Amino acid sequence: MPFKISNISPTIEAWTQLQASSPYASPFQSPEYYAFLLSQPNHLPLILTVGSMETGLNDLLALILIDLQNNHLRRLTSRAIVLGGPLISPDCPYEALRQLMKESINLSRQNNAVYFEIRSFFDYSRYSDVFSSLDMRFIDHGDCLADTSSIEVIDHNIQPRKLTQIRSALRHGITFIDNPTDAQITDFYALLRVKHWQRTRRPIPPLQYFLDLAHTPIASILLAYHNDALISGCVAMHGPIGDPQTTYYYYVAGENDLYRSLAPSSVITYHFLQYANKIGSLNASLMGAGRLSIPFGVRDFKVKMGGKTILTGRYLFLIHPLIYRLASFALNLLHRSDT
């Protein structure tokens, strides 16, 4: 069967219809996220769709939203990232997906990306033959998924000692803000920038990225305070309020050293899980569990918070292998210099 590939944004109706039918739907492959990326200076959203020649693009078989990220180092760090993974309809033929992925790699190459990577939040193993046929390397990254169908389930799944610690901290008068002002988001950004760099040795997007994201219908910034002092916060990515699709724990930071007795990271994670339940999500992804073959302390924390480790994987295609290896080597040196 012949298929039609297009780099023209589909109608909102066709896009949302595919979202509703796809088991791989996430806010990172939504028209709202596409509109947000269009407004960001260091991001170029690239979109590709595939449909049959008979029905055209009004009946989409699959869609992929690629975030081409650039910064001042451009040639060394330009990368094509697919967050969440492609939207695929239940009846999408393997050949249609293969053509879509092949064209995605070509489009990334034309835009000078060093590499193309799918950071999947779902199990795409049924399509592993498609990815391997295009020489995409599978990496055993995992995610942590928590059941947020009820507050009782959330509490039950958290390690008892951790839950006791959280409840003890909450009794000290911690308050939460779910709709912060721009000034409060700016304070959170200052904390996040420092903590993220200390943990990963990588920069985060500029402040305006978070200010703009907070004003979209698919993101909420949650903050925790004690005596008017910001102790932790996170970015929650979600579908429309009341939509049962998963809510995602996108960025997080806590003043764990300064307020150790208040367990900043634990209380904001707990509030995030409760918030996911409040807006109607049946599950919440605590996201990055690292490579499952390697011990990872962050993954251990997320499991204690009720997350169940799942293998979602990443699929990587190196467009410029030498530049990729040089950049990876430089990043590893940066990590070692701090140890």
Image: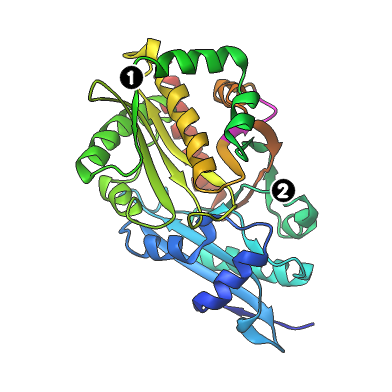
Please determine whether, in this image, residue 165 is positioned above or below residue 312: above
Q: Amino acid at mark 2?
A: Asp
Q: Nearest to the eye among marks 2 and 1: give it.
A: 1
Q: Residue at x 32, y 55 (%)?
A: 215
Classed neighbour count for the residue bearing mark 2: other residues with Cα under 10 Å, few (<14), some (14–19), many (≥20): some
- SS label for mark 2: loop
Q: CA distance from mark 2 to mark 1?
A: 40 Å
Which quarter of the figure is the N terminus placed in? bottom right
Residue ID for mark 2: 123
| Image location (x, y in percent) of residue 70 | 38, 54
Residue ID for mark 1: 173
Please determine whether, in this image, residue 165 is positioned above or below residue 327: above
Question: Is residue 93 located in the magenta-colored stretch of the structure?
Answer: no
Q: Is residue 193 left or right of residue 314?
A: left
Q: Which residues are magenta?
A: 288-294
| Image location (x, y in percent) of residue 316 | 62, 49
Q: Amino acid at mark 1?
A: Gly
